[in-house]
Amino acid sequence: MTSGTRGIGKSVHSTDQTAFCELMVGARKAAGLTQHALALRLKKPQSFVAKYEGGERRLDVVEFIAISRALGADPLKLMATFVTGGKGKSAGAKKPAA
């Protein structure tokens, strides 16, 4: 059975994937973080952030929640923003306390 017969494509570069990447970039920027600063919070290399933001890598739900929390964002609000077609700035990300 090919992926096309199920109605869900496997393309990493789908319209929805692009929108998700834009949401994640917007949420990071709304939190006032660079890719490097976020990577430090996640204890991951900067390339991890660059790859999922650029659409080269997909996130699983556990990673999405960890990233949302590192951004100071509510994962449910962030996902709701994605589902309703919004962008990252209204996703509940807040600037971290200094």
Image (cartoon, rainbow, N blue to C red):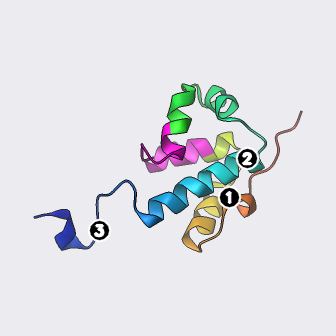
Residue that badge 3 annotates: 8
Residue lying at 58% horizontally and 25% vertically, measured from the top left: 43
> SS for tag 3?
loop
User: CB of mark 3 within 8 Å of CB of mark 1?
Assistant: no
Give the residues drawn in magenta, as a range: 51-67
Kind of residue at badge 2? Lys
**Is 27 displayed left or right of 64 in the figure?**
right
Give coordinates of residue 28: x percent, y percent.
69, 46
Q: Amino acid at mark 1?
A: Gly
Q: Looking at the rendering, in which quadrant would you find the C terminus?
A: top right
Q: Which mark is residue 88?
A: 1
Q: Residues within 10 Å of mark 3 (few under 14, many from 20)?
A: few
Task: Answer left or right for 17 relative to 96.
Answer: left
Label whose residue precedes the other's in the sequence (3 or 1) = 3
Q: Quadrant of residue 95?
A: top right
The residue depicted at 40 percent of the width and 56 percent of the height is 13
Kind of element beneath mark 2: helix
Front-most of 91 and 14?
Answer: 14
- Label located before the other in sequence (2 or 1): 2
Give the image location of residue 71, x and y in percent: 69, 43
Q: Are marks 2 and 1 in contact (CB under 8 Å)?
A: yes
Work out whether 1 lies above or below 31: below
Q: Residue furthest right?
A: 98
Q: Is residue 58 left or right of residue 66?
A: left
What is the crowding at mark 1: few (fewer than 14 residues within 10 Å), some, or many (at least 20)?
many
Decide which of tag 3 and tag 2 comes sooner along the chain. 3
Q: Which mark is residue 29?
A: 2
Task: Looking at the picture, tell me which residue is in the foreground, 18 or 37.
Answer: 18
Report how far apart the C-alphas of labels 3 and 1 lie in the structure.
25 Å
